[in-house]
Image: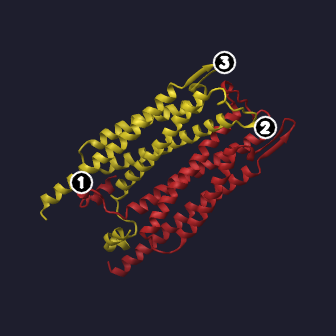
Chain colours: A yellow, B red
Amino acid sequence: MGGLTQENVVEDENYGSNMAETMMRLLPMGLCVVALVIMLKNSQTNDFGSLSYSDLGTFRYLVHANGICAAYSLLSAIVAALPRPTTMPRAWTFFLLDQMLAYIILAAGAASIEVVYLAYKGDTSVTWSETCGSFGGFCRKATASVAITFIVSLCYVGISLLSAYRLFSKYDAPVEHYNNKRGIEIANY
Amino acid sequence: MGGLTQENVVEDENYGSNMAETMMRLLPMGLCVVALVIMLKNSQTNDFGSLSYSDLGTFRYLVHANGICAAYSLLSAIVAALPRPTTMPRAWTFFLLDQMLAYIILAAGAASIEVVYLAYKGDTSVTWSETCGSFGGFCRKATASVAITFIVSLCYVGISLLSAYRLFSKYDAPVEHYNNKRGIEIANY
C-alpha cells in the first residue's frame, strides 16, 4: 500500500470519528439546555405560599452546572469538528476538562436528587417535613430536571472514556512485554 | 544493550510502579475505614431528643459507599501487589471498577455534603429548620466523615487516571501521524 493511500484512509477514519465525537458532544448540550430551562421556569405559588428553584441552594448549583456543561459541550463540539490532527496538548485539555465536567455534573445531580428525595419523603428525625404534598408541580419539574442531568452525567462518562482513550493511546505502554502480540490480544478481547 | 538487561530493567520498573500503585490503593482504604467508623459511631442524645446517622438515608448510603470502597481498595491493592504482568482483561477490569468507584464515592460525598449543609443552614422556604444548633456534636462528626470521603474521592480520581493510562497505553493511537515523532512530542510536553 502506498504512503498516499494510507494517509487518505487515516484521514477518512479521522473525519468519521470527528463527526461521531461532535454528535456525542452536542447531545449533552441539548439535554443540559432542557434541564436548565425546566429548572429556571420551576416556581409554584399556591395557598401554602410560593416556592422557586432559587430558594434551594442545590438547585441554583444545578442550574449553574448545567449552564457550564452546555457552554463547554458546544465549545468542545466545535473544536472536535475542526478537521485538525489531534495534538498532545489538545488531547490533554479535552481529557482533563471532560473528566472535570463529568465530576461536576455528577456531583450536581447527586446533591439535587438528595434534595428531591427529602422534598418527597421528608425526614421526621430532623423535623424536615415533606414538601411535595403542597408543591407537587414544583417537585415533578425538579425531578424531570434532575433526571435529565443524570442522563447528561452518563453522556459525560462516555465522553471521558473516549477522551481518555484518545489521550493515553498516544503514549507507549509502560510495560512493553506485549508489544509483539498486542494485535492478537486486542482481537481476542 | 542485551535482551536480558532490557528485560531486567523493565521488570524493576514494573515492580516499583506496582508498589506505588499498592500504596495509592491502601491510602483510600484507610481513609474509608476512618470515615466509616466516624459515621457509624455518630449518634447524639440530649434534651431535644436523639439523632443517629441511620435516621438519614444519605448517611446510610455514605456508610455503604465507604464500606464498598474500603473492601474494593484492599482487594485491588492485593491484586496490584501481585508480581504478574498486566494483561488486557485485568487492565480493563481495574479501569472500569476504578471509574465506577470514583463515581459512587463522589456521588455519596456530594449528596452527604448537601445534607450537612441543610443541617447547618436549614431552608426556611421549604420549612426545613437547621438542626446543628441542637445537635452540634452530630454535625461536627458528620462533617468530618464527609470531608474524609471527599479526600477519598480525590484519591480515586487519581487512581482512575492511572488505570486509564495503564489500559489505553496498551492500544495503538487511533491516528498514527505522530508515531515517528512521538518521543519528541512527549519530551516537549
- Which one is nearer the viewer's eye here, A100 or B65? B65
Q: CA distance from mark 1 to mark 2?
A: 61 Å
Residue A7, relative to residue B141: is it above or below? below
Residue B166 is tagged as none
Whole-Å distance between the Cαs marked 2 and 3? 33 Å
> Which one is in front in this view, the residue at disc 1 or the one at disc 2?
1
> Where does the N terminus of chain A fall, quadrant-wise?
bottom left
Circle 3 residue? A47
Q: Which residue is mark 2?
A: B135
CA gap between label 1 and label 3 equals: 61 Å
Tell me whether circle 1 and circle 2 mark residues in contact (CB < 8 Å).
no
* Percent of width and height locating residue A58: 58, 33
Return the residue found at the far right: B47
* Residue A80 located left or right of residue A120: left
Residue B35 locus on image (x, y percent): 68, 52
Q: Position of residue B69 (x, y in %)?
A: 61, 57
